[in-house]
Amino acid sequence: MIMSLYKEAVFPILQHFDAERTHEITLKLLSLAEKYTFVKRFLEKIYSFEDPRLEVRALGLHFDNPLGLAAGFDKNAVAPRALGVLGFGHIEIGTVTPKFQAGNPRPRIFRLTEDSALINRMGFPGRGVDAVKENLYRSREREVILGINAGANKFSVEQGKAADDYVKVISELASWADYLVVNISSPNTARLRDLQGKEALTQLLKEVRAGMRESGIVKPLIIKLAPDFEDMEKEVGTILDVADRYKIDGIIATNTTVSRDGVTSSLRDESGGLSGSPLKDRSTEVIKFSYRETQGKMPIIGIGGVFNAEDVVEKMEAGASLVQVYTGLVYEGPGMVKGIKRDLVAFTERGGISNINVIVGAAV
């Protein structure tokens, strides 16, 4: 009911307005639940649905369900508690950079409705680590697992000092996080993906780990991969080898893609990272390879083209312990999370499954 109302009545109206402006208004409305208890309770009454069969143990943490909100939706930690009320098992904040950054010129988000996709070329816009820290303090009573996605300012990447930025964000925000993410895969900051190369990644993780030891930080550390590789087995295999060497606790597969394979929209040539349905199979391939390569010993958060419970099951059977959404939420609306969880419970009942965890890696 809620999902159909959004898709049939609300989203068609939203399509007439600038995508980024609509997103900003949505966050402002959600932030009301951060301030007013009655708004939070109202949202809980509409969207609350949990079942023990959906509980997940991963990264040394307990998640109420496998569904999470990907980084990029709430860059500055404006509404983590409110987003948690929508039913997510975890929320990932960011990408956070040490200093304020305006990002790329607008417009920089495009809806490719025919393809159920988005293109963004945001370029890590954000208010910086101090503002995020202030917002996290106000949301300290949250009940949802929180990840902090760390990035580097554009000028730091250009000057070869990206590692300093990652260390800064992690050291400043780790106390608020349940897990930490090193984002080395956004296509919208020049040279950032170069950090996925063996030598660059080795040096980066060496410095990040040293910074964490110096600050006494003991939190799960994961890296976010791109989906675009000329030789996936060789390149992803190398990344996983380096990750294992520095005891990385998990990976996120994947970020947005620069490929436009299968895209039909007239906006297909806009520069930036593509997310949504066209990314689905590509990200699943990276998940499946990573799961096989690590023999299932490194937890994977799968993301890319997730719109329904079938997509979640596909990602988990490929090897993902947790699954994140972003573009799907834009197209399906806030009722999406509850709908997926209900359908996942129905899936476990049909299969006689005691817990959704048992399907992880089943297709590998």
Image (cartoon, rainbow, N blue to C red):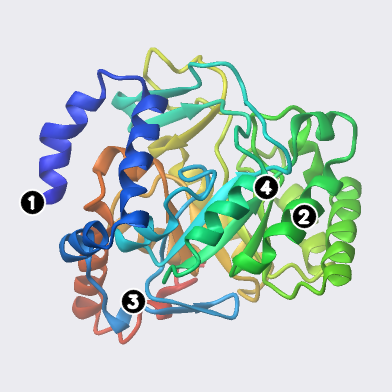
Q: Nearer the viewer, mark 2 or mark 1?
A: 1
Disc 4 on helix, strand or loop? helix
Circle number at residue 129: 4
Q: Residues within 10 Å of mark 1 (few under 14, many from 20)?
A: few
> In the figure, 17 relative to 207: above or below?
above
Do we see residue 146 in this rendering? yes
Among the two numbered marks 4 and 2 on one chain, the one whose residue lies closer to the N terminus: 4
Q: Nearer the viewer, mark 4 or mark 1?
A: 4
- Residue at 31 percent of width and 87 percent of height: 354
Can you give x and y, in whole percent of width and height, for residue 242 in the image? 83, 60
Residue under label 1: 1
Among the two numbered marks 3 and 4 on one chain, the one whose residue lies closer to the N terminus: 3
Q: Amino acid at mark 2?
A: Ile
Can you give x and y, in whole percent of width and height, for residue 91 in the image? 47, 59
- Residue at 21 percent of width and 61 percent of height: 38
Among the two numbered marks 3 and 2 on one chain, the one whose residue lies closer to the N terminus: 3
Alpha carbon separation for disc pair 3 and 2:
30 Å
Q: Nearer the viewer, mark 3 or mark 2?
A: 3
Q: Nearer the viewer, mark 4 or mark 2?
A: 4
Circle number at residue 239: 2
> In the figure, 138 relative to 21: above or below?
below
Q: Amino acid at mark 1?
A: Met
Do we see residue 301 in this rendering? no
The answer to whether the residue labelled 3 contacts the one labelled 4, judged by CB atoms less than 8 Å apart, is: no
Can you give x and y, in whole percent of width and height, for residue 158 in the image? 84, 28
Return the residue nearer the eye: 170 or 295: 170
Q: Is residue 344 left or right of residue 195?
A: left
